[in-house]
């Protein structure tokens, strides 16, 4: 078997599409090498080695050693250097690289191959003894930390002492002899801690580092990251071994990171940062303030440090050409890492760049307009859930705000919350339902659980590519990075800036689009939905087959849905209309009524309210269909159950307390979800059904009279199991329609349909279609009844089912294609064989879930209906599933 893949010298064994085998980094290094970009030679140990390692008690495949040996020889001949050589030593980096990028989660070792012999050669070749021993010192520390597991502060003590002795503040002010001594002290630490010597043999170092990377796949950080990002454990990581290039060998050296377009706005502008005379990690760690790549960026950020364009114009031009080569090749925005060693450019990494949601849309639209990709590719390049992030609020421009500090606009959106200074505290308060802003000097991968829990993140150090910035953008959390005027005191749990002090628990607002930090809660406004958002939505609408409707009952929700592009209402849950204000009183009077006359009196009150609501919905939807569902929940849900509350209800409804008690007891059911609810209510109390039908038809008559566009009324019967139920209720509804027509002297059209929420209804779909003019799949109940799984209680054990791999997704979130999906498919076929042109849609929560929408498209449904804020997501998902 082939376990090792080479790259370098314009050639490579691997390709970009081999990410599963080579990891993202390895596959892209191979691709870059083979399109002729300047990549230092190296090789990749595949993810299959990792899998083998974990399946075989941490043993490597037996051919591995020989294959690594061969690959190493090739790197030696490609670089003209030799591992462990006393005049021209090869030094390598060893890095992890999983299929999906997991920034900073796993381990890296640089400068590997240094020992007491090779360090002298490096000193001679570079002509810089300080550099050679600094590299050696860093290597010993990194290796000891990552591979040998010795805590870093053991070494830092020595470093501090060396600086004290020399009377200097900065590491770089130490003299070569200081560093040489430091290496000795570091090795002594290893001897003391481990009882054995630091490995001098480069091969031993190499195998140590490879083992450490594979082991790091199972460290806690990596596990947390995987579970947050749904990355399966069995994917494993690859290991990349690559010839070192140095960005810290002098002032003709540099290292940097860049995005081929602005990752925050998506603008087609080269965007990045670099540091002269520094090693790669220095840029990301945010220890020194980096310089801009372009003159334009330097000017617009008001930086007084010169840009790469000014300092190294030739290299800058070369980098520009790499930029366009990469974009043409990958047809996507790239995130690159490069190093300049003694005036020569090397590419160390490329990958599709993480970007904000607005940037993702802008880039997709621009690239399609530039002809780099097609419109379909543009649509397919966007994860529908991204759209969700765009729909979130920004600061109200009219609001008063007291800006106390400014940092970099690292991830857009505005958020306010209570200040916390540690990730653990963020998680703790979040669990208690508090909104928090995580404030850190800088963040590290150890903080991701806190970043996840927080509404937003503020750091006082680091650039646009710092850890906090990258992770926040990925998670869609607002982030202000590098707000350097703020001083954070972790021990006292407070921050200070000028005369302002903010302690833990006080409220801050951050604006990640502007980089501003404000005290107190600043009001926000809804997002502007134009520009590239509008373009993408328009392109999506051009290609999708399925319509998108919304589940809405309040005028506000209906308007919001319309604004987001809903083409009608797929579900009005009428019971939601009865919970507001005085309405609940009439509802309770109806339930507490002892005879039909009493009940009718209460129903008359409800009729007025219901008619007004539905009229408004018809008006808002302006000729688009509105599906109004008859009352669905069991009546006990409208009656409280404590004595005190019952007493209040009795008073408000003007009935004796005893009657409330008795009625509550009567309505009690052992399994209310399978009990007296849905159409069963209307069967028992036809007058409720009559009232609701009347409200709908009177509203239709009214709107039909006064509006240009005729309302499209759809009356929907819930929880039907038998044809007889539907037949009976259809009779009641039709009779009411006829009565209203006659009374009002006007005609209107309407449809009567049924929900399919029970397996029996799906089975009987052929016969139900004789009665029903449309079907709407209530996949919440259909999932519940197909699985025999309570939608209210499954949360207590479903996570375990997921963890044990019994189900891949929560079936209440993502439609189960094999069970529930099969029932829907069958019902659609049976229904359409009776009534070929019948409209069918889905109105369960799944209607807003992209994976479920794809299932609906495959089944051939006519529409999905989802909550208003999911409408744009559903429009894009529907387009993607049609492509
Ligand atoms: C459903 O069951 O999927 C549905 C839409 O109805 P409800 O969620 O109101 O039960
Ligand atoms: Mg239901």
Image: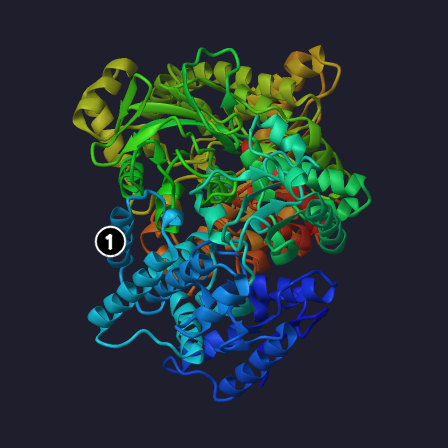
What color scheme is it?
Answer: rainbow
Residue 541 visible in image? yes
Say left or right for 422 vs 681: left
The percent position of residue 686, horizontal first and vertical second, equals 48, 30
Query: Which residue is the site of mark 1?
Result: 157
Along the line of sight, the residue nearer the viewer: 289 or 495: 289
Along the line of sight, the residue nearer the viewer: 40 or 883: 40
The percent position of residue 588, horizontal first and vertical second, equals 34, 22
Say left or right for 660 vs 576: left
Q: How many labels does the image show?
A: 1
The percent position of residue 577, horizontal first and vertical second, equals 46, 23
Along the line of sight, the residue nearer the viewer: 685 or 470: 470
Location of residue 426 with respect to 236 vertically, above or below? above
Q: Which residue lies furthest to the right in this view?
A: 371
Badge 1, how many Cα within 10 Å: few under 14, some, many 20+? Answer: few
The percent position of residue 412, horizontal first and vertical second, equals 53, 31
Location of residue 627 with respect to 817 vertically, above or below? above
Q: Which secondary structure, mark 1?
A: helix
């Amino acid at each position: 078997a082939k376990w090792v893949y080479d790259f370098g010298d314009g050639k490579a064994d691997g390709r970009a599409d081999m990410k599963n085998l080579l990891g993202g980094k390895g596959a892209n290094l191979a691709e870059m090498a083979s399109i002729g970009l300047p990549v230092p030679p190296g090789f990749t140990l595949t993810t299959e080695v990792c899998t083998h390692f974990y399946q075989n008690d941490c043993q490597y495949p037996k051919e591995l050693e020989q294959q690594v040996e061969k690959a190493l020889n090739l790197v030696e001949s490609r670089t003209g250097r030799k591992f462990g050589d006393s005049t021209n030593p090869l030094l390598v980096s060893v890095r992890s690289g999983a299929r999906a990028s997991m920034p900073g989660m796993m381990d890296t070792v640089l400068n590997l191959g240094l020992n007491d012999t090779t360090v002298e050669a490096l000193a001679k070749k570079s002509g810089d003894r300080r550099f050679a021993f600094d590299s050696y010192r860093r290597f010993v520390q990194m290796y000891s930390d990552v591979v040998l597991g010795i805590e870093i502060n053991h070494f830092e003590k020595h470093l501090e002492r060396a600086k004290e002795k020399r009377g200097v503040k900065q590491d770089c002010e130490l003299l070569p002899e200081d560093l040489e001594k430091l290496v000795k002290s570091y090795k002594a630490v290893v001897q003391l801690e481990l009882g054995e010597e630091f490995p001098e043999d480069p091969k031993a170092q190499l195998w140590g580092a490879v083992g450490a990377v594979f082991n790091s796949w199972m460290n806690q950080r990596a596990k947390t990251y995987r579970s947050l990002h749904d990355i399966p454990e069995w994917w494993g990581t690859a290991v990349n071994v690559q010839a070192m290039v140095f960005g810290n060998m002098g002032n003709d050296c540099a290292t940097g990171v860049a995005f081929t377009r602005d990752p925050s706005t998506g603008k087609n502008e080269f965007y990045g940062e670099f540091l002269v005379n520094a090693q790669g990690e220095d840029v990301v760690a945010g220890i020194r303030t980096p310089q801009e790549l372009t003159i334009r960026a330097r000017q617009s950020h008001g930086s007084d440090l010169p840009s790469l364009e000014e300092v190294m114009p030739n290299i800058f031009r070369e980098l520009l050409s790499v930029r366009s080569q990469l974009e043409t090749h990958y047809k996507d925005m790239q995130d690159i890492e490069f190093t300049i060693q003694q005036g020569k450019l090397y590419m160390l990494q490329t990958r599709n760049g993480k970007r904000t949601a607005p940037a993702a849309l802008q880039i997709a639209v621009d690239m399609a307009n530039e002809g780099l990709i097609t419109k379909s590719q543009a649509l397919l390049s966007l994860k529908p859930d991204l759209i969700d992030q765009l729909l979130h609020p920004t600061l109200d421009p009219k609001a008063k705000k007291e800006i106390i500090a400014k940092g970099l606009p690292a991830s857009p959106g505005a958020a306010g919350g209570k200040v916390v200074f540690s990730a653990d505290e963020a998680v703790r308060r979040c669990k208690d339902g508090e909104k928090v802003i995580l404030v850190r000097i800088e963040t590290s991968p150890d903080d991701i659980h806190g970043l996840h829990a927080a509404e937003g993140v503020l750091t006082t150090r680091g650039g646009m590519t710092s850890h906090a910035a990258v992770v926040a953008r990925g998670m869609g959390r607002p982030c202000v990075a590098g707000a350097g005027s703020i001083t954070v005191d972790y021990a006292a749990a407070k921050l200070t800036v000028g005369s302002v002090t903010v302690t833990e628990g006080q409220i801050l607002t951050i604006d990640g689009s502007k980089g501003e930090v404000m005290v107190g809660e600043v009001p926000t406004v809804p997002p502007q939905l134009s520009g590239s958002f509008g373009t993408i939505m328009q392109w999506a609408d051009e290609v999708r087959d399925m319509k998108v409707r919304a589940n809405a009952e309040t005028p506000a929700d209906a308007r919001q849905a319309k604004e987001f592009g809903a083409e009608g209402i797929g579900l009005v849950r009428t019971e939601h209309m009865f919970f507001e204000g005085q309405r609940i009183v009439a509802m309770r009077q109806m339930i507490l009524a002892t005879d039909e006359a009493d009940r009718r009196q209460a129903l008359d009150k409800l009729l007025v309210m219901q008619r007004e609501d539905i009229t408004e919905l018809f008006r808002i939807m302006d000729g688009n269909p509105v599906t109004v569902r008859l009352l669905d929940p069991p009546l006990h849900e409208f009656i409280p159950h404590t004595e005190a509350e019952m007493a209040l209800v009795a008073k408000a409804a003007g009935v004796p307390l005893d009657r409330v008690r008795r009625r509550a007891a009567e309505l009690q059911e052992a399994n209310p979800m399978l009990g007296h609810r849905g159409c069963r209510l209307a069967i028992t109390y036809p007058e409720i059904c009559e009232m609701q039908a009347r409200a709908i038809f009177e509203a239709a008559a009214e709107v039909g009279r006064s509006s240009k566009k005729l309302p499209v009324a759809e009356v929907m019967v819930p929880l039907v199991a038998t044809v007889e139920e539907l037949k009976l209720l259809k009779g009641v509804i039709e009779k009411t329609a006829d009565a209203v027509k006659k009374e009002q002297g006007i005609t209107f059209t309407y449809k009567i349909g049924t929900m399919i929420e029970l397996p029996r209804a799906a089975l009987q779909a052929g016969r139900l279609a004789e009665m029903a003019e449309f079907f709407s799949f209530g996949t919440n109940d259909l999932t519940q009844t197909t699985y025999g799984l309570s939608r209210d209680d499954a949360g207590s054990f479903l996570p375990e089912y997921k963890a044990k791999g019994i189900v891949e997704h929560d079936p209440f979130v993502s439609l189960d294609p094999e069970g529930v999906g099969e029932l829907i498919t069958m019902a659609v076929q049976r229904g359409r064989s009776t009534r070929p042109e019948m409209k069918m849609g889905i109105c369960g929560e799944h209607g807003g879930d992209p994976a479920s929408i794809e299932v609906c498209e495959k089944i051939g449904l006519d529409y999905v209906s989802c909550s208003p804020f999911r409408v744009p997501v559903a429009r894009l998902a529907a387009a993607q599933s049609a492509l």
